[in-house]
Image: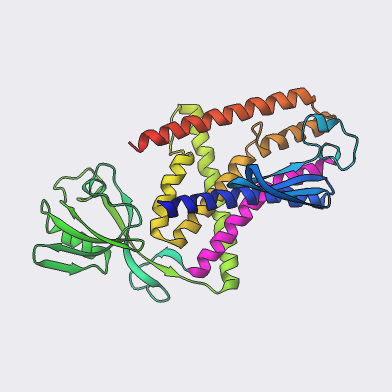
Amino acid sequence: MILTIIVFILILGILVFAHELGHFISAKKAGVRVDEFGFGFPPRLFAFKKGETTYSLNLIPIGGFVKIFGEEQEEKRSKSKRAFYNRPAWQRAIILFAGVFMNFLIAAVFLSIVHGLGVPSLIERGQEQGFRNIQIQIIEVAKDSPAEKAGLKIGDTIHGLSFRSEVIEVKEVEDVQNFIAGHIGEELNFSLKRGNETFEKIIIPRANPPLGEGATGIAMAKTGLISYPWYKAILKGFETAGRMLVTMITMFYLLIKTLILKGTMIGEVAGPVGIYSLTSQFVKLGLIYVLQFAAFLSLNLAIINAIPFPALDGGRLLFLLIEKIKGKPINMRTEKLAHTIGFALLILLIIVITFRDVIKLF
């Protein structure tokens, strides 16, 4: 549990810090005055000043923040050319978008490391060459199935099966399928591994399972790790991040479309509690899976921040676009009110999602 808490804080801390670092670097490059760049959130532990910027270390280690002069309502009245509000629109757009870009970049870095260490991949029969840690892995567990009730999870690997004195070593998916088919209704002993933990579970295969679920309710695949040289790993990391981003944007579009048109959700939405629960599962599977999960979260953060909704980076970019179309800045009070309402709605949404996540735990 302590390890999960540490990993959870590290992941969120790195992702939010990277996002704010994007704003910080781009603002500095554009000549905008940055008053403070902080790691973590207040209360402040200590700080030092270099040039015009205060660098602070704060008590709550989840993320960071950047205070750019000319973003606040009262600062927008400043006539200084170094104020954010007074910079050309294209520079402000780059500063606002830089956080989203950094989240994509950090996801690509994580995935590059994964490809260097060894990326989990499906293996076709007879194509094992170049792979290591070859195993039969559970890739799906049906709800309310014997496997779920026994505590099996996605990512668990099956190493052996036994019934009384009959014992087999599992090397192919067919080994599991054939053994289960020959012992319907009988107590089978599954030898499993989850991360570094080995354990056993008793499962009784069903005679008449629901369509598409199978006798125990699991789907399996032969998997292994394949590594790449560092230069190929970097290319693969960016390529994978790009594919993931496109897929996630498509799924997000379908989720919103279905929610608006039909009033139903086609997927699950997780808040901090749900993310913590998932982190716990990936920690048990190992570093590679944690890095993949972190990359997934970073891309999610990029997509969410890019949404043209008040209080988000995408919302601020939308106001900037309206300003360019109108040919003059939007009324300060109107923009501030929109961002305040947007922020309140986002907090409310987080509370609702967190409440749902807590209920699922019980």
- Specify whether residue 303 is painted magenta: no
Please report the bounds of the magenta region as a residue range: 88-117
Q: Residue furthest left?
A: 165
Viewer-closest of 245 and 60: 60
Viewer-closest of 71 and 161: 71
Expressed as whole percent of the image width and height from the top left, the position of residue 102 reads: 66, 52
Which scheme is used to colour this image of the protein? rainbow
Q: Is residue 221 rendered to the left or right of residue 205?
A: right
Viewer-closest of 205 and 347: 347
| Residue at (29% x, 42% y) in the render | 143
Expressed as whole percent of the image width and height from the top left, the position of residue 133 reads: 37, 70
Q: Is residue 323 rendered to the left or right of residue 249?
A: right
Q: Residue furthest front?
A: 46
- Specify whether residue 96 is painted magenta: yes
Magenta highlight: main SS: helix
In this picture, is 150 found above or below 115? Answer: above
Q: Is residue 206 rendered to the left or right of residue 64?
A: left
| Residue at (79% x, 27% y) in the render | 330
Expressed as whole percent of the image width and height from the top left, the position of residue 41 reads: 63, 43
Viewer-closest of 299 and 13: 13
How many tags in the picture? 0
Q: Please state, as top left, top right, bottom left or bottom right, where the C terminus lies in the image.
A: top left
Residue 98 visible (yes or no): no
Residue 232 visible (yes or no): yes
| Residue at (16% x, 48% y) in the render | 206
Expressed as whole percent of the image width and height from the top left, the position of residue 82 reads: 87, 43
